Amino acid sequence: MKKTMIVLVSVALVLTVLVGGLLAWLFIKLNPKQEAAPSVEAYLTENWKVFRLRSYDPDTGSLALDYPLQFTYAQMKKYGGSMQELQDLPIGNLDTVESLKTAVRETTKVILRNVTVYGMTSDEQVAYTVLPDGTITACWDE
């Protein structure tokens, strides 16, 4: 009786270890791997192609983006204040910044504290700036 009990306990123990090992192996094989969150730079380059990355500082959560324009600086200075479409560009960028910050936070798990957008003319000059506090400076207001 004692030998039978030892054999039964040993068999139960071996089966428990085998079943546990099988379950662990199945869990590892079938569990989908967690993808690492993309970097802020990679995410912006892939999903926010309308902007060009100017700079990003992960320590401060500061991001600077260029918004390419089809006009020269002289054209922006001359017509920017008189064309509603051009006047609305910085305000549209301001709204976009909030969407961008939310999307970056949800995708990369990074909180952007300061985002600045520079409206860059075709001759690579800054026509307007949208600052993190919402202030907009434009060359046509000078």
Image (spheres, rainbow, N blue to C red):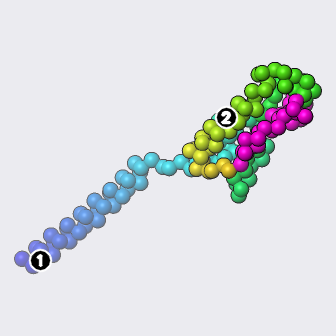
Q: Name the one closer to the observer, 46 or 90.
A: 90
Is 121 colored magenta in this rendering?
Answer: yes
Name the residue that disc number 2 marks: 95
Q: Is residue 69 above or below residue 27?
A: above
Instruction: Give the residue at x 12% y 74%.
Output: 5
Mark 2 secondary-structure assignment: helix
Which percent across, then down, holds residue 3?
Answer: 11, 77
Point out the frontmost of discs 2 and 1: 2
Is 8 colored magenta in this rendering?
Answer: no
How many neighbours does mark 2 have within 10 angstroms: few (below 14), some (14-19), or many (20 or more)? few
On the picture, is 43 further left or further right than 80? left
* Range drawn in magenta: 114-142
The answer to whether residue 56 is visible is: yes
Q: Is residue 32 above or below residue 8?
A: above
Cα separation between marks 2 and 1: 79 Å
Most distant residue in the left direction: 1
Q: Amino acid at mark 2?
A: Asp
Give me the disc on residue 3.
1
Q: Which image quadrant is residue 65 in?
A: top right
Mark 1 secondary-structure assignment: helix
